[in-house]
Image (spheres, helix red, strand yellow):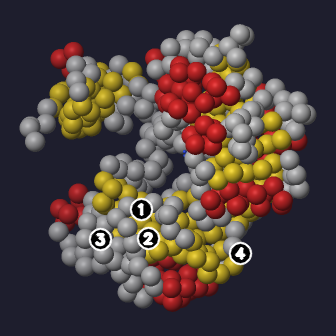
Amino acid sequence: MGRQKHYEQQEILDLDYQGYGIAKPEGRVVFVEGVLPGEIVDVRVTRRKKNVGFGIPTAINRRSKLRTEPFCAHFGVCGGCTWQYLGYDDQLRYKERFVAEVLERLGGLAEPAPLPIIGCERDRFYRNKLDFSFSPTRWLSGEEIERREDTPDRRALGFHVKGRFDRVLDVGTCYLQPDPSNEIRTQARRIARERSYSFHDPARHEGLLRSLIVRTTEDGEAMVILVIHEERPDLAAAYLTELANAVPAITSAHYVVNPSRNDDIGPHEAHHVLGTQVIHERCARLRLAIHPKSFYQTNTRQAERLYAVVREWLDAGPTDTMLDLYCGIGSIGLFLADRVGRVVGVEYVEEAVAGARLNARLNDIPNAEFHAGDVRELLAAAGRAGSPIERPDLIVLDPPRAGVHPQVIAELIRLAPRQIVYVSCKPSTQARDLAALNEHYEVKRVQPVDMFPQTFHIESVADLRRREGTT
Ligand SMILES: C[S@@+](CC[C@H](N)C(=O)[O-])C[C@H]1O[C@@H](n2cnc3c(N)ncnc32)[C@H](O)[C@@H]1O
């Protein structure tokens, strides 16, 4: 690796939509982490990609008036809440601007300007799910290394260090998830150490305990999912039972065996150990059962507000068929089912589809059906003989961060619903997809909704109407 360039006294000219500050030493763009517009900083360039650089500040010589004191002791090392140096109102202001910027720059859509952002009432303790990693060698701070103290027991349970997927920070208090999340993690670590269970080392691909997923609900239910590296059902059950005895607020516990090198538990079965099989979340008037492996919006209160936007915008009639694509446990479709004749949801995680069907029954919703499969394949068959999916009048889609595949765009155009409501957790891929649909669908309005305070992430909903004469 070549020598890392260091520039002094660089002014931060602006923020880009991924939260980086933009500096231009020697006229070349460098994206700098952790800085704000107007600040004068010294920058070390840590990597280059094409003709831009990425860097970190080594000194902040002039501070922005907007800079605030981070509230978490782990700030700076933890990969979690990376935007704590900016107050929440200013975060919202920038996020609204980020959405406008990507729509214009990546989507070619200067109009319509996004509506004013919908912020969160709670900017801490807003998540309902966290995934903690075990590690035999906790991350040591620079100070600890300098002190050269003996640190014989480095077994940790916490989050990955920023930018280091092989290093884990032993987390004390985390401000992301409400009680009993901190207590569960603390007790889980204590018990595992006392019982001398082995902590997983991804580099060596050995050690039993891999991760602990904690899911909480607004009504105080708490689910833990222990991920272990090899089949040890008795140990997993004993560990989870001891943990549930130590934290009586735990209402459901499962374990998953993941012997593979990657952390995706999707392909592996969840084994129920104690308490209820699922936990229940309230979403407006719906009661949703959540399975250990199902996706659900991680900010429950804000999910209600997001879905309310979709509901308000839906131009629906009682005989309409509406597709809910990438439907997870069916929450959006079920939330809208009373406005249409029929809801058809599509999702590829089988357990989530089973959950969506259960949720339809639980909420007495007879006109919603759910199909397991890849959106791309099911859409390709839709409207053709033998397909369970007829031509829809309306489509709501909520894809993962990568956005939708070009073939899905082509199918949306072929199916020609009169309205598409596109919910996105990554406005840059949404902007790309809106541009691809633009010849056939006009973007009427865009609503940024903040689901992830203290981070640069932002959700965005777009209302698309079929252009006249494009069927
Ligand atoms: C952002 S989540 C949205 C879930 C749901 N709409 C909600 O509000 O809770 C995206 C969902 O799409 C599913 N998914 C991702 N790619 C898919 C594909 N190609 N076909 C079907 N489902 C997919 C994921 O499993 C996940 O449940």
Q: Name the residue under label 4.
A: 276
Q: Name the residue under label 2.
A: 258
Task: Name the residue rendered at 76%, 57% in the picture.
Answer: 357
Residue type at mark 4 is Thr
Residue type at mark 3 is His
Q: Is mark 4 within 8 Å of ligand 1?
A: no
Mark earlier in primary sequence (1, 3): 3
Q: Name the residue under label 1.
A: 263
Front residue (pair 352, 304): 352
Mark earlier in primary sequence (2, 3): 3
Give residue 213's position: percent from left, percent from top.
53, 65
Q: Does the residue labelled 2 lie within 8 Å of ligand 1?
A: no
Mark earlier in primary sequence (2, 1): 2
Mark earlier in primary sequence (2, 4): 2
Residue type at mark 1 is Asp
Q: Nearer the viewer, mark 2 or mark 4?
A: 2
Q: Which mark is residue 129?
A: none
Mark 3 closeness class: few <14, some 14–19, many ≥20 residues within 10 Å: few
Mark earlier in primary sequence (3, 4): 3
Mark 2 closeness class: few <14, some 14–19, many ≥20 residues within 10 Å: many
Task: Name the residue rendered at 59%, 56% in the picture.
Answer: 349
SS at circle 1: loop
> Which quarter of the image is occupied by the C terminus?
top right
SS at circle 2: loop
| For the residues bearing labels 3 and 4, Cβ distance under 8 angstroms | no
Give residue 95's position: percent from left, percent from top.
53, 29
Q: Mark 3 points at which residue?
A: 205
The residues bearing labels 1 and 3 have C-alpha atoms spaced at a distance of 12 Å
